Image (spheres, grey):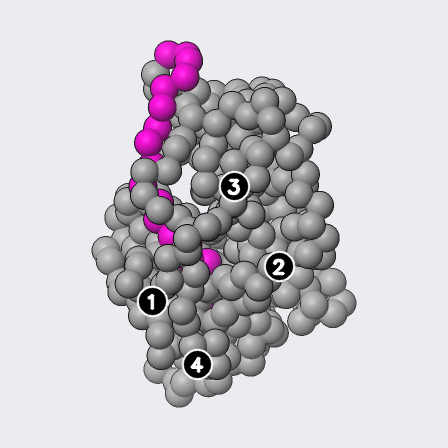
């Protein structure tokens, strides 16, 4: 049995590229900070095809913001990578590497490995995500396009409206939304229901529980007056996604699970805490998953841990998955530290 953590996804299953296989076969394609940061803030339109928008923009936005992005930096954010590789098991100075466009130190964790741009840009990712959680809609309403704790104020139909979101999502499935206004006002509240959320539920005030269709915006059009609680539940089921080379990714809701490999951080240069580090594995990483592909829930279990101050760090992961594996006798490491 091995344990997988929710906060360590370093793989192409984050779906950063539309054509995943192309990205994998062309092994010199890497993901950089600016790519994550652009995805976090730069695609803030609702297209006409809402289902496609949800799948291609917002489900993917959360995958990046909650998985790939935090995996590219140290939990204290003092060191980051310039190039992050899928399935990387070693991060070191690589004179012999599979990519040629960046320097040998591009996948170190450091202050400004390879080039300083990401040092200045990396901090924009989560703030941009937080400031783009809500949007106005063409019918003068508000749309929640991604979920995280937040507060916003807006003037809708001449009324001052405050919205508060309290949640431990993506580590829990409940999202509590409070709408407050002192002036009775009619406007629609649009709630994104992710493509993976097959049994989502919405309850407004003391009303009954409504089913919300996955891959849509669930719209609550009503008159808002005083304080109204909107309870959204997005139950998460384990899913397997097949990828290149018969690989399998374990996903549950917006989170992707990966093996927590023991890490040795070897000091390379610089002044702590903003130093450069190579990272080497101290535990095996070459396991195959022995899961029941037809019924993954029967062979993969999930355990909730408290949601602490660093929920996206390996040590602070609020969800732990356990599954059965088979240790492989061989598994290659491509030049430049990526598992083959
Ligand atoms: Zn950069």
Element marked by disc 3: strand
Q: Earlier in the sequence, mark 2 or mark 1?
A: 2
Specify whether tag 3 is near ligand 1 (CB below 8 Å): no
Which dot, 4 or 2, sits closer to the camera? Answer: 2
- Alpha-carbon span between mark 2 and mark 1: 21 Å
* Residue of label 2: 244
Left-right relation of 58 to 321: right
Left-right relation of 51 to 174: right
Dominant secondary-structure state across the stretch colored magenta: strand
Q: Earlier in the sequence, mark 2 or mark 3?
A: 2
Which dot, 1 or 4, sits closer to the camera? Answer: 1
**36, 200: nearer the viewer:** 36
**Residue 155 visible, this orientation:** no
Specify whether tag 4 is near ligand 1 (CB below 8 Å): no
Instruction: Give how far across and how far down residue 244 sits, in percent.
Output: 62, 59
Q: Residues within 10 Å of mark 1 (few under 14, many from 20)?
A: some
Q: Earlier in the sequence, mark 1 or mark 4?
A: 4
Instruction: Give how far across and how far down residue 125 sits, in percent.
Output: 53, 39
Left-right relation of 264 to 330: left
Q: Which mark is residue 295?
A: 4
Q: Which mark is residue 324?
A: 1
Which residues, given as a range, are shown in magenta?
A: 253-271
Q: Residue at x 57, y 64 (%)?
A: 246
């Amino acid at each position: 049995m091995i344990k997988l953590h929710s906060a360590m996804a370093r793989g192409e299953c984050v779906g950063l590229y539309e054509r995943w296989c192309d990205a994998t076969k062309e092994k010199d394609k890497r993901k950089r900070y600016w790519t994550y940061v652009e995805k976090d803030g730069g695609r803030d339109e609702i297209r006409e095809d809402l289902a496609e928008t949800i799948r291609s923009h917002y489900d993917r936005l959360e995958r990046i913001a909650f998985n790939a992005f935090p995996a590219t930096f140290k939990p204290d954010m003092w060191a980051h990578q310039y190039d992050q590789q899928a399935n990387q098991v070693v991060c070191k100075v690589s004179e012999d590497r599979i990519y040629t466009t960046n320097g040998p130190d591009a996948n170190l964790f450091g202050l400004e490995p390879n080039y300083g741009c990401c040092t200045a840009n990396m901090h924009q990712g989560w703030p941009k995500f937080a400031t783009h959680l809500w949007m106005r809609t063409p019918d003068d309403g508000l749309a929640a396009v991604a979920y995280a704790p937040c507060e916003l104020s807006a003037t809708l139909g001449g009324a001052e409206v405050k919205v508060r979101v309290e949640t431990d999502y993506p580590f829990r499935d409940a999202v509590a939304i409070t709408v407050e206004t002192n002036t009775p006002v009619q406007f629609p509240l649009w709630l994104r229901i992710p493509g993976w959320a097959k049994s989502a539920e919405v309850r407004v005030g003391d009303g009954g529980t409504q089913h919300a269709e996955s891959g849509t915006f669930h719209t609550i059009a009503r008159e808002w007056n005083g304080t109204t609680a909107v309870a959204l539940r997005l139950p998460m089921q384990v899913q397997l996604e097949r990828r290149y080379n018969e690989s399998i990714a374990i996903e549950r809701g917006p989170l992707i699970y990966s093996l927590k490999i023991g890490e040795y951080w070897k000091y390379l240069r610089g002044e702590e805490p903003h130093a450069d580090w190579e990272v080497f594995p101290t535990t095996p990483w070459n396991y195959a998953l022995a899961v029941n592909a037809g019924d993954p829930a029967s062979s993969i279990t999930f355990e909730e841990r408290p949601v602490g101050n660093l929920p996206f760090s390996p040590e602070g992961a609020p969800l732990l998955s356990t599954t059965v594996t088979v240790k492989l006798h061989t598994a290659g490491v491509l030049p430049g530290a990526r598992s083959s």
